[in-house]
Image: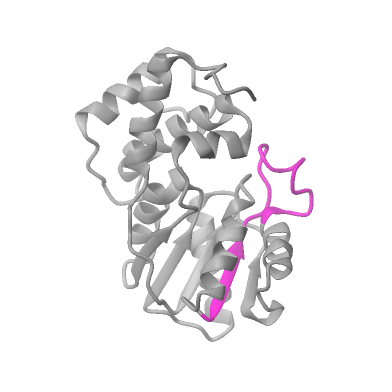
Amino acid sequence: MSDDRRAITEDQWHQAELIWDYHQMRHEPRPVEVAIGLGSHDLGVAAHSAGLYRAGLFPTLVFTGGNSPTTAAVFPRGEAVHFREHAIELGVPAEAILLEPHATNTGQNISLARAVLAAAGVHPATVLLVSKPYMERRSFATARKLWPDVEILCASEPLEFADYLKSIGDEKLVLDMLVGDLQRVMEYPKLGFAIEQEVPDDVRAAYESLVRDGFTSRLIAS
């Protein structure tokens, strides 16, 4: 990709950056009992999880995720399986990792990872969710709904928006994902999937602008 902003206009870039900033919870990482790496198309989740493990923030790491249309070609054996392998390559001991290879959405990531932990005799009071940078808020809202008795912290690779776009290499996909995740933040509480999150007016306006501009492939029917 070249250094100009190619597939997206300056205005679209600005609107997307507003949404990007909103999605991040900006929690300060600190020691917890368990971390859960949420499966996705972004192998950076596994790499960041490995770095946090090596920093001593938790003793147990769960990778959760099967496949989706976005990841089937990239991670043919499933997101969690590939994430686990990458984390082991980066120095995480295999015995520190639990595997949940079936989840196909964020709610299942949380509930099935919780079940895997319980089966291993682990009942944490503090959980760190490691996700894509723009999935922090939705994963937080989902976990608070489904697992209200634990303290939830969020973490993701500390990348600026421009750097993340370059790392993924597909601007349209990233903007579609930003828009889709924000829609879910707004709509899922009504469906009982997540807790309510306040959405500032400028973020809502950015969402509506990008929807009008056609960044809609990740939207759900609402």
Name the residue rendered at 36%, 24% in the picture: 15
Instruction: Say how the picture is coloured.
Output: one colour
Name the residue rendered at 50%, 79% in the picture: 56
Q: Is residue 37 above or below residue 58?
A: above
Q: Is residue 193 visible?
A: no
* Percent x, y of residue 59: 53, 81
Q: Is residue 68 above or below residue 146?
A: above
Name the residue rendered at 66%, 69% in the picture: 99
- Asked where in the image residue 80 lies, by quadrant, the reply is bottom right
* Percent x, y of residue 138: 40, 47
* Percent x, y of residue 89: 74, 67
On-image quarter of the C terminus: top left
Name the residue rendered at 68%, 73% in the picture: 91
* Percent x, y of residue 29: 38, 67
Decide whether residue 70 is among the magenta residues: yes
Front position in the image: 73 or 134 = 134
Residue 124 lies left or right of residue 71; in this view the side is: left
What stretch of residues is rendered in magenta? 59-79
How many numbered marks are there?
0
Q: Is residue 199 visible?
A: yes
Residue 54 lies left or right of residue 90; in this view the side is: left
Front position in the image: 50 or 33 = 50
